[in-house]
Image (cartoon, rainbow, N blue to C red):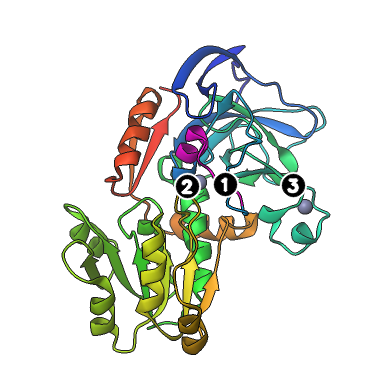
Amino acid sequence: MGSIDIPQTQTVALVRSLGGEVEFKTDYPVPSPGPNEVLAKVLYSGVCQSDLHTKAGTAAGSDGTPITNIKLPHVGGHEGIGQIVALGPGITHTAGIKIGGLVGIRFSSRICRRCEFCLAGVEQHCTSSTNHLHHEDGSFQQYIALDADYLTVLPDDVDPKVMGPVLCAGLTAYKAVLNANVRPGNWLVVVGAGGGLGHLAVQYARAQGALVIGVDTGAGKADFVRGIGAQEFIDFAKEDPIKRVHEITGLGAHAVVVTAGNAKAFAHACEMLRVGGTLSCVGIPPGSPALETPICTIVIKGLRITGNLVGSLKECMEAVDLVRRGVVKPVVKVRPFKDLPQIYEEMEKGDIAGRIVVQLTE
Ligand SMILES: [Zn+2]
Ligand SMILES: [Zn+2]
């Protein structure tokens, strides 16, 4: 591949203030890759619920208070797929890094590699990490500089259109299913099964050998959720999901993965579980409500409750490989970059099946 023309300026989706509108700026500078960085041309980016929360200023930290140290103006996007177009000074074509190679733009952007969590392989919790949601411009721009030492190098033979959502929604779903700790033949419930994250959780759970019950509502969701491999579907607007789970499973589900951002769903999930079952929490309800499950229920049923913030780069590559091999098939709808404000509005209404991906360049 010969030299690639890199423009001086690019189009980005800029948010100037939290709660403000998305503004397309066409003369934003193209970053130049520093030492130990690569420059990637962004091809596609998934649109994640956390982009919406960050833009709206409603994203909460671990203590439940709103995250305030968000870079402004802000460029969202952390489910991006790019192609390397330039290497920073000192970078050689090693470790899979090459001009034209595909890379991922994920939530985590840089890590220290030395703290307890980096050393333990849970570097998404690195004590001095930065991410593409709060600290650095993300994939809603046409060019991005990425840390070469923490680069998500993707295989050449993946479909860049579908792979973006795997890097956040897919990885989170995969990790939530790993945390759910199910064995082949165990019943796993996915609440929010037709959504961007939920439809991937259904498939990763099937890949682990679990029998899956999808819970969701809305036109076409039953066929959609059964179509991606769920054994059973419960429309929570039409029937009592707790009762139905017990009817289907006998003693209750072995695990419930809650992807819905609704506090009630978490309390209901605990009631769906059998003795020794696991609640795997993924969605973060707005306003940071507490889990409503009585402590006696947790103690007497011996429940396990696990939380989940994306996953490590290694787990990301495992999630990618299951898609690459066709075991998990992300359902995506590709739309032009200029539709982003409209996509946010549709996400707020919440009736999107699968995931929306924007195409950054024509
Ligand atoms: Zn995300
Ligand atoms: Zn660290």
Coordinates of residue 315 in the picture (x, y in percent): 59, 60
Callout 1 amino acid: Leu
Counting the numbered discs, the total is: 3
Looking at the rendered structure, the secondary structure element under dot 1 is loop
Q: Is mark 3 within 8 Å of ligand 2?
A: yes
* Residue appearing at x 47%, y 24% in the figure: 20
Position of 50 with respect to 115 (left or right) is left
Count residues near mark 2 (Cα–Cα under 10 Å), then give few for <14, some for 14-19, many for 20+: some
Q: Which residue is mark 2?
A: 158
Element at badge 2? loop
What residue is disc 3 on? 111
Q: Which mark is residue 206?
A: none
In the displayed structure image, the side of residue 329 where residue 132 appears, left or right: right
**What x and y, as percent, mark residue 53?**
48, 40
Residue 248 position in % (x across, y down) = 25, 82
Residue beneath label 1, please?
Answer: 154
Q: Is residue 58 magenta?
A: yes
Image height check: is 55 above or below 4? Answer: below
- Residues at circles 1 and 2 in contact by the CB criterion of under 8 Å: yes
Rendering quarter of residue 318: bottom right
Q: Residue at x 53, y 24 (%)?
A: 142
Disc 3 residue crowd, few under 14, some 14–19, many 20+, Cα 10 Å: many
**Amino acid at the residue labelled 3:** Ile
Rendered-image quadrant of the N terminus: top right
| Chain-order first, disc 1 or disc 3 | 3
Q: Which stretch is magenta?
A: 51-61
